[in-house]
Image: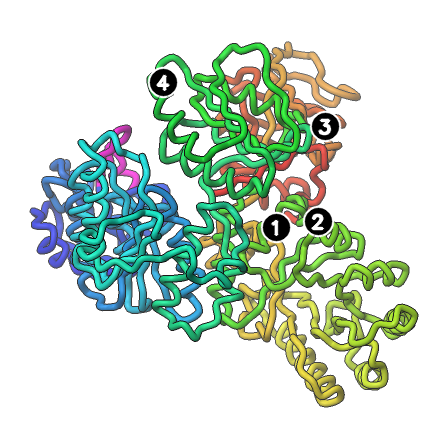
Amino acid sequence: MKLNLSYQKVIEVTSAQMVGVKGNNLLQTVVFDTRNIIEGEDAIFFALQGNLRDGHSFIPDAYAKGVRCFVVSQRPDISLFKSATFLLVDDVLKALQQLATFHRKKFEYPVIAITGSAGKTMVKEWLYHLLSVQFKIVRSPKSYNSQLGVALSLLEMSDEYNLALIEAGISAPDDMRSLREMILPTHGVFTSFGQAHADNFKTKQLHLAEKLSLFESVECTFFNSSLQLSPDTIKKINGIEVGPDQFVKERNLLPFEDEASQLNGRLSIAVAKYFLGKEIDLKKQIATLPQLALRMELFEGKHQNLIINDSYNMDFDGLEQSLEFQLRKANGRKRVVLIGLDASNAHLKDKIQHIVAAFKPEVFEFVQAGESEIASFENAVILLKGTRNAEMQRYVRYFKEKNHTTYVTIDLSAIKNNLAEYRNLLKPSTQLLAMVKAQAYGSGGDKMVRFLEQQGINYLGVAYVDEGVELRKLGVKLPILVMNTEVEALEDCIRHDLEPAIFSMSQLDRLIKELIILGRSNYPIHIKIDTGMHRLGFYPEQMSALCDLIKAQPEVTVKSVYSHLADADNKRDKRFTAQQIKLFNQCCEQLYKSINYSFTRHILNSEGIANHSIAQFEMVRLGIGMYGISSNSDLKRKLQPAFAWYSAISQIKTIKKGESVGYLRSFIAEKETTIAIVPLGYADGFRRSLGNGKGQVFVKGKACKTVGRVCMDMIMIDVSSVKAKEGDLVEIIGKQQKIEQFASQMETIPYEVMTSISSRVQRIYLEE
């Protein structure tokens, strides 16, 4: 966000009354949540009032973070904020919308407004994916489609872009008028029309008219023929109907087979063709459309079941999105929907039944708190949805394959964000190789690889042939580079179409002999050059002999040449890295002149991308950076942590002065101490060296040091300063304790922490 607004212009646009000092600097960004303020000097804080919180109560916090301009509806005590400017308005949200409307009018490029009962976010993200081949696009973050969300989305517009994708959602009559006045759309997309918020409208026709009023003055509106809009309605919105017989070849490339994805897919393809022209080839983009879902847990359950745990609330929009997500995940498997309602929500039963029936699951049941028996299912996709009071977590625990209290969460939405941030540092043409060795750094190879495939990754990298073979058995089609190809595994490597890294003459000779035996030619290989890391690789002085051998052997063809930076995170002295890059270039030039055909070059890893993106060549390798870990402070602020580790308290005890805890009585209480026992030990990856207070975890936001030695399956922690109880959550890695801090306690690096966590620790995947 870069608004370039003077104080006077904000006052003029919002009709505000100024109180306090008059600011002179330009205002660049809008904030309303103090947790997101990094540098507040050029920010405007809008003190929004919600059902649970009043933004005015957070003014001191925002002021402490450097904010000096506040839009408020309550007159402040300016003596407490002597260098602040307060802009007093009647309605803070309306003032924000006025500012968004003013800002929107600065830009003349196309603005595509997207609305509908379901599928808005999916179509927006798919259009972004398809249209990005030609347009620089600003789009609504996440699912920002409310009165507030639309305003914030529009404020992201700038001259840097040439197209905007804006979601719009309504819940009551007259909602769309204010959204339309802000967005001023040039084009429209109407995704669907369903039951969401229908009770707030007198008739179905009024509900539909409210949604379609967004498109009253647009050049054209795209909609699926299944909506069956009347001719008069189509004329009003300049409608372009998208039918089932259109874009058949393109739709066959869609990576999703469920009906909702097919409908949204053809709608997205139609819009993309309209803006890009029919001659643009979208095959690659269509085949790699990303999968989206709301925040939920997704994990493997007992009896080959896949469990979707959305048992946190009972809202209707969320239910529809969960059912859509289940449909996409099913791939022919039986769908089971279990809905939990407590007594206060029993009146919702009929409406829920109506919504679920539209998706036609094979099994649909309401479950009640206290029910003794739970039905058993096999090879099904089970959706658990309901209120907390309905005790749905009992069903979650029942269906889990592993009930070990200690678990790791991998936030796929954060990884998606991090991929985007790294891609922002690269040219659009630069390919991305994702390293998924060691079970994707301990995050789970199967799930991570499938997710990365959906994100448009070009290549996968593993350490050993066995890892690549496992991925091929799972049906992974992406090219896979094996970094450490052992000669004993060359036959398996070839039979599973894995691409070996070649780092020595003897290894290359063995590969060629194996290829001759198998009758293979032009087999892709990747040449590893040692430019200074001094691990695997050819020395530059070996290049002549290597070139001669490759030219003489039709069995192999060079797919890529790569090297590894030894000092990529050293921003103070880049001379060694510069020398490595220079040497790498020379070796590549020598090989090219010899073999006379092109190949891909790559030398940058995660830290290299952050600090030396000028040397990105045709491809880069991304590993630990996907999880939000980087030593580059500028990039680190934009990355989101994707890896967290939790457990729970099993028991609490009071230890008297003089009593000991644990093996060899290494802890003797100097005073009465309350300890908690946590089912987490060195067999899980919590190293023994963290015992006796060297390591710590967090309970209710407070640091709790270890007491005594770390056992194989348990640790003891000091909870004397915490009002803890059995069952309380224990954070090992998360918001309170970053993985870098935990690794420092272990005197190691995040790589080792992640890859050392035992397979008995369950992995839970979060998606948004």
Closer-to-camera residue (283/183): 283
- Tell me if label 1 and label 2 are in contact, CB under 8 Å: yes
Question: Does 444 sit above or below residue 23?
Answer: above
**Colour setting:** rainbow
Quadrant in which residue 133 is drawn: bottom left
Identify the residue position indicated by label 3 in the image. Answer: 710
Question: Does 253 sit above or below residue 675?
Answer: below
Q: Residues within 10 Å of mark 2 (few under 14, many from 20)?
A: few
Q: Is mark 4 on a helix, strand or loop?
A: helix
Residue sitting at x 31%, y 68%: 162
Instruction: Using the rendered image of the protein, determine whether residue 543 is visible from the camera's viewpoint.
Output: yes
Real-space Cα distance between discs 2 and 4? 42 Å
Real-space Cα distance between discs 2 and 3? 37 Å
Point out the tag, 1 or 3, that comes first from the N-terminus: 1
Determine whether, in the image, residue 232 is placed left or right of residue 692: left
Identify the residue position indicated by label 1 in the image. Answer: 450
Mark carried by residue 345:
4
Residue sitting at x 23%, y 36%: 204
Asked whether residue 61 is drawn in magenta, I would say yes
Point out the tag, 2 or 3, that comes first from the N-terminus: 2
Residue sitting at x 43%, y 59%: 245
Between tags 1 and 3, which lies in front? 1
Q: Residues within 10 Å of mark 3 (few under 14, many from 20)?
A: many
Region of the chain picked out in magenta, as a range:
47-63
